[in-house]
Amino acid sequence: MVLDVNWTVKWLTLCAQAMAEHRLELIELDRAIGDSDHGENMDRGFQAVLAKLDEDMPETPGAALKMTAMTLMSKVGGAAGPLYGTAFLRAATAVGDAIEVEPAAWAGALAAARDGIVARGKAEPGDKTMVDAWTPAVDAARVVADGGSPDVLDVLVAAAEAAEAGAVATDPLVARKGRASYLGERSAGHRDPGAVSTALILRAAVGAAA
Amino acid sequence: MVLDVNWTVKWLTLCAQAMAEHRLELIELDRAIGDSDHGENMDRGFQAVLAKLDEDMPETPGAALKMTAMTLMSKVGGAAGPLYGTAFLRAATAVGDAIEVEPAAWAGALAAARDGIVARGKAEPGDKTMVDAWTPAVDAARVVADGGSPDVLDVLVAAAEAAEAGAVATDPLVARKGRASYLGERSAGHRDPGAVSTALILRAAVGAAA
Amino acid sequence: MKKLINDPRSVVDETVQGFGLAHAGLVSVSTDPLFISRQDVPVAGKVGLVSGGGSGHEPLHAGYVGLGMLDAAVPGAVFTSPTPDQILPATLAVDSGAGVVHIVKNYTGDVLNFETAAELAEAEGVSVRTVLVNDDVAVEDSLYTAGRRGVGGTVLVEKIAGAAAQRGDDLEAVAAIAERVNANVRTMGVALAACTVPHAGTPGFDLAEDEIEIGIGIHGEPGRHRIPMESADAITDRLLGPVLADLKVSSGDKVLLFVNGMGGTPLSELYIVYRRAAQIVADAGATVERSLVGNYITSLEMQGCSISVLRLDDELTALWDAPVHTAALRWGV
Amino acid sequence: MKKLINDPRSVVDETVQGFGLAHAGLVSVSTDPLFISRQDVPVAGKVGLVSGGGSGHEPLHAGYVGLGMLDAAVPGAVFTSPTPDQILPATLAVDSGAGVVHIVKNYTGDVLNFETAAELAEAEGVSVRTVLVNDDVAVEDSLYTAGRRGVGGTVLVEKIAGAAAQRGDDLEAVAAIAERVNANVRTMGVALAACTVPHAGTPGFDLAEDEIEIGIGIHGEPGRHRIPMESADAITDRLLGPVLADLKVSSGDKVLLFVNGMGGTPLSELYIVYRRAAQIVADAGATVERSLVGNYITSLEMQGCSISVLRLDDELTALWDAPVHTAALRWGV
Ligand SMILES: Nc1ncnc2c1ncn2[C@@H]1O[C@H](COP(=O)(O)OP(=O)(O)O)[C@@H](O)[C@H]1O
Ligand SMILES: Nc1ncnc2c1ncn2[C@@H]1O[C@H](COP(=O)(O)OP(=O)(O)O)[C@@H](O)[C@H]1O
Ligand SMILES: [Mg+2]
Ligand SMILES: [Mg+2]
Ligand SMILES: [Mg+2]
Ligand SMILES: [Mg+2]
């Protein structure tokens, strides 16, 4: 298994599928502590990515990630659009024009993506945002990637599992960034929608490699 | 038992009581085929009549009826205000300045009231309006009044019973006047609120004589 | 029932008080009897324009008091026409000697109360002409009933007759212009959800989640037909069809297209309806010369809309465009 | 969910199309990317004013495009900020060389998308100043969070900054006026019933028949506290207290008092709230110099209102009074 452009395209396709399937769930999460649009936004964005893939097949993982960044930036809107847009853009820059992305490079790309989100959104871990899924994912990916002769599937699995755990761990938090922060204490007891969509994206990465 | 000013005042007081008690019922009837205000309008009007009686006690039945006419005209609004206002005004004119109203004169006053309503509102019997309670009441009162040495209580009872039956008989009618006419066939199957308030008024007349 | 009110019985008084405070430079409020008038009535030499009716249709009528429109508005209780003892003093207050036009929506209650007031005003030496507005094509068999209701067209009659009075037309001429507008306007409405009259406490009718009422009036009363929910375009077709047919709109006609919200419908939805309505009018070969979209004659928080079409001629267009300065309609000044 | 729409996904496009048709003489519509601009942009020598945000707040922002207010409005999906590829061309379209002010409501999404667009515009040689509106006093601990939201004050910022641009102020001066308005306005809102985002299909929050949400924003999101239903006067006190305290309104101040409907509340109720609010302001020794009552920044069909107070000085009052000609605000022209 290698992270080439076929994997990347399959990943993005699975992301689109996941957003369509979980659209209502993400809307419902956003309804509780936000404005009921996260599922709609992500679904719209990834459907647009699919349409782009139909038009023009990218030649490298980096090209696919960059196209995704630009598409999300221009189709998602809201907070999630610029944040995911920046994340994919930084990941694209990190992988450069490699034909195949090595495990360590992928861990680095995830870190770059997370750093991009933090740079734009200024959220810290614990603020109850997507950063709470990205940060444990980045850490877990790096641990596996830094081990002896890592398998890239293990890196992807570690990231997905950590992101999922990170999303669940947002439940008790009081939001300090994003729309949920307006709710104050009332934001506790709900899962952050952006953390959940992050987990879906990273889980799709595993699916594409399976 | 005679129809003097005491009876008239007691009648108006019982009218006010009846409108307050049946306020919601009249609203509910008007809700079905009108605009949900008949009970509120009648209640407001007769409360104002009570207030006037408190200020200034009339000296004859005719004076009491005239005061009622003016008050309903200026406080009820809607269709019912001018119609009941005209009815009481015509009745006041019919009884003149008599100290006691004889049975035949009362039957005549009721007829004058009904004629006033028809003159203003142009409704015919069967149009599903208050006329469908007034007309049988007038007829029944006249029959009793025209009989040998009539008891005025019998005149009042006959009018009330006929009005009540007339109100019930509006149920199957399709409205051709007033707000209910906009509903067309959908007005059938509902009782006309103005016919019901007419019956309440004529029933109160019996109560005042009992 | 959840409403931003203090007491169902003080709703009208407090609304008018708030209105008077918010538009203090524009209107005066008489509290007993209750009516709202232009600051500067009577306007010397000008025919006075008075309208009124039940409350709950805001901004109608108080929102249309001001230069180029009404001289006074007389609010009744919610959905209940005002009484002669309000209408008469309003009429006397605005009469400059040039006479007064009563613009009356065709409902039994409004007609009877304005009729009495007009008689009393004439007895005091004021010439009164009454113009009945009856533009609602949802009312069928109107010959055998109380006739068609006055609905959306009322706003257009008040604006255009107001402009005629403002430019100095005499009593007969102002009444004639008002009649002409009424003769050339038709309206039909739909409700998606009923409104609740404060003193009643329950909605005027009950609609299931997938039902709408076609042919509603403006008093929270049920409509003529109840049908399953449809798309905005289908509903627009259903409303506009009878309007265009009854008005006999044909190729080359110039019209004013008015999409009115009933109070509880988002403006965005009114524009979706307007979009389709404009297409249909264009398909009929007519030209939309002027438009109006918004909540201008409402039924409390009812959800739904009405569509009005007014056939224009050059004079009506010019009068529509004439300056108006009221709380709810303002341009040219 | 019952709405006058055709398809949840075409709501914004069709609304804007209808808006463009209804106000054809006033605005132009670019459909791809979607934005609305004055007919006559770029206006030679004038600083351009661009605002935008999620849809569902109509008439904001498209309703404020025109002479003396915005040069362009950029609508996102319902309650979702627009994207840089809409904001950038709108910015380029209105720039006459004098630069462009972005008026941005302080939400993470709006801030980020406008930020990107501003960067791209600067890269194309257009000077952009961004003014964040953050007038919502319901947001506590704002130092440690995303900060206060931009709500009702946005309308006032757009009107007054628009007048400054129209009279010929330069880029820094227009931005400074906008900042001054924002610094002097505070707002707080209440919801009696939630709205339903078309693509979501269920209300943004659930309220019992006897509950209200205090401290709501304009995105159908839940508020800060949920309390039992109260009278209009009590609710008004509850909203206006924090507004006056935070703005430190004191005796002798002159203010603009703005009671805004959330879209589904009858105008009559807004006047009942206004009545009480005007009393409270008077009790505080301040003078209401200007007022605004109506549905100016909404949340679809949400029931409720917000109250804004803007402290005026002579220049702000003059700019408020300056002519404006937009679909939703018009005077002096
Ligand atoms: N400052 C921020 N930093 C990181 N993530 C954020 C920030 N603000 C919001 N988010 C994420 O964005 C998600 C909401 O996205 P979405 O609903 O699409 O946008 P909006 O909040 O504009 O409606 C939140 O659940 C959160 O994870
Ligand atoms: N033309 C008419 N002639 C006689 N009675 C009428 C006429 N129109 C209406 N009514 C009566 O008035 C009643 C309605 O009164 P109300 O609800 O108070 O006034 P509104 O219809 O103006 O809301 C009807 O039930 C009917 O009995
Ligand atoms: Mg959201
Ligand atoms: Mg009624
Ligand atoms: Mg009524
Ligand atoms: Mg959003």
Image (cartoon, coloured by chain):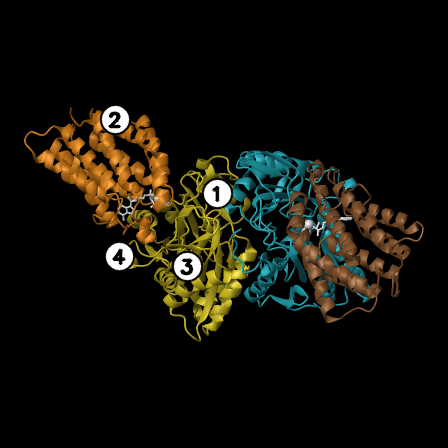
Chain colours: A brown, B orange, C yellow, D cyan
Query: Looking at the image, do the residues carrying marks 2 and 1 touch, with CB atoms under 8 Å apart?
Result: no
Task: Tell me what residue is drawn at x 31 percent, y 45 percent.
Answer: B79
In this rendering, would C295 be left or right of D213? Answer: left
Query: Which is nearer the N-term, disc 3 or disc 1?
Result: 1
Question: Distance between the Cα atoms at labels 3 and 4?
Answer: 20 Å
State the image coordinates of residue D299 (x, y, percent, origin top left). Answer: 60, 49
Residue in the foreground of this view, choosing between B76 and D147: D147
Chain for mark 3? C
Q: Secondary structure at mark 3?
A: strand
Q: Does the beta carbon at disc 1 come under 8 Å from ligand 5?
A: no
Q: Residue at x 20, y 26 (%)?
A: B209
Q: Position of residue D313 (x, y in %)?
A: 69, 47
Task: Provide the residue designation for mark 1.
Answer: C16
Which of label 3 and label 1 is nearer to you? 3
The amino acid pointed to by label 4 is: Tyr
Q: CA distance from mark 4 to mark 1?
A: 37 Å
Q: Position of residue D91 (x, y in %)?
A: 73, 64
Mark 1 — on which chain does it sit?
C
Q: Are marks 3 and 4 on the same chain?
A: yes
Residue occupied by mark 4: C144
Q: Residue C188 has which mark?
A: 3
Q: Left of B116 or right of it: where is D266?
A: right
Nearer the N terminus, badge 3 or badge 4?
A: 4
Instruction: Say which residue label 2 marks.
Output: B10
Q: Amino acid at mark 1?
A: Val
